[in-house]
Amino acid sequence: MAEPKLATAFGALAHRAPNDLPSLGRSAVALQAEAEDVLMTVADALAPGTHDMTLDQRLAENWKRPEAADPIRRAMVLLADHELNASTFAARITASAGATLSAVVLSGLSTLTGPLHGGAWRGVSGLVDTATAMGAREAVQSYLAQGQSLPAFGHPLYPDGDVRAQALLPHIPLPPIFAELQAAGEEMVGERGNIDFALSALADVFDLPRDAPLTIFALARTVGWLAHAMEQVTSGRLIRPRARYVGPSLEV
């Protein structure tokens, strides 16, 4: 189930999507102006506040943790784009059809909520809860003994460790349970903490809401989706993958 503020963002975008102008046939200036407006629609849902504040400041103020603004800013910069991940590809497909920019963001946000994408924070949260209850090493051993992959560690694109996490973690005073998990995970799994680990550590150290990692992720990535959408629209090409039927022959 979507978190309340995320549900508000879905509702606001769904209201706009069929009513805004299609993206095709419009100038880059017009699209940029609308992109800014769509971004504010998402920001107003996830971090209500005045438009004279930066997005990281709005999140920090909403969570009454102004001291968290700088690490939130760093996280958002690192999360704004990540080439053609699942949500960005969905957004570009929507944009390629000439849909409204609000529909583009709605597509991306819908994909982001999947447990294998932006919803990965839940797995990290569960791991931290288990580690808090039984100890970090014991938690890692328990996951591995049950044949479960360890949330928060490793990334298929980064065999030497998630560079986003490596850029963010030095700016976060790592809570003890996260430091213990980091050591146990690296020793027993041979992988380093990824961006989901870093976001969860950020949320923990500043006592942010449990779903703060997804909120930060969604607001930051909205910027990236909109940039991808404008690039895709200007290409004038419809993304249309092909498929080949490999089943039994059919008689018509």
Image: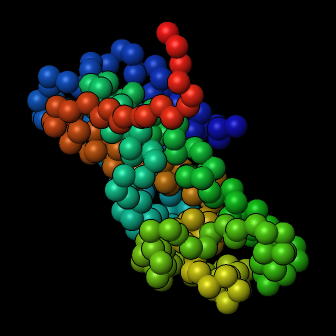
- Position of residue 34 measured from the top left corner of the image (x, y, whole percent): 25, 31
> At 11% from the left edge and 30% from the top edge, which residue is drawn?
27
| Residue 131: x %, y % from top left | 80, 75
Pinpoint residue 179: horizontal percent, then vertical percent.
Answer: 66, 84
Outermost residue, right side: 134
Is residue 114 shown to the viewer in this render? yes
Judge from the rendering whether residue 83 lies leftward or rightward of residue 43; answer left or right.
left
Q: For the N terminus, give its image quadrant.
A: top right
Tell me which residue sits at (50%, 68%) in the image.
Answer: 156
Of 38 and 90, the residue lying toward us: 90
Q: Position of residue 250 (x, y in %)?
A: 53, 19
- Rendered view: 76 above or below 229: below
Q: Residue at x 55, y 52 (%)?
A: 117
Snapshot quadrant of residue 158: bottom left
Give the farthest residue toward the top: 252
Q: Quadrant of residue 57?
A: bottom left
Decide if residue 131 is on the left or right side of residue 251. Answer: right
Vertical side of 173 occupied by 33: above or below: above
Can see residue 53? no
How many numbered marks have been drawn onto this rendered protein structure? 0
Tell me if residue 204 comes above or below residue 6 in the rendering: below
Q: Residue at x 14, y 22 (%)?
A: 25
Quarter of the image where one finds residue 28: top left
Give the side of residue 154 with respect to residue 90, left or right. right
Q: How is the image coloured?
A: rainbow
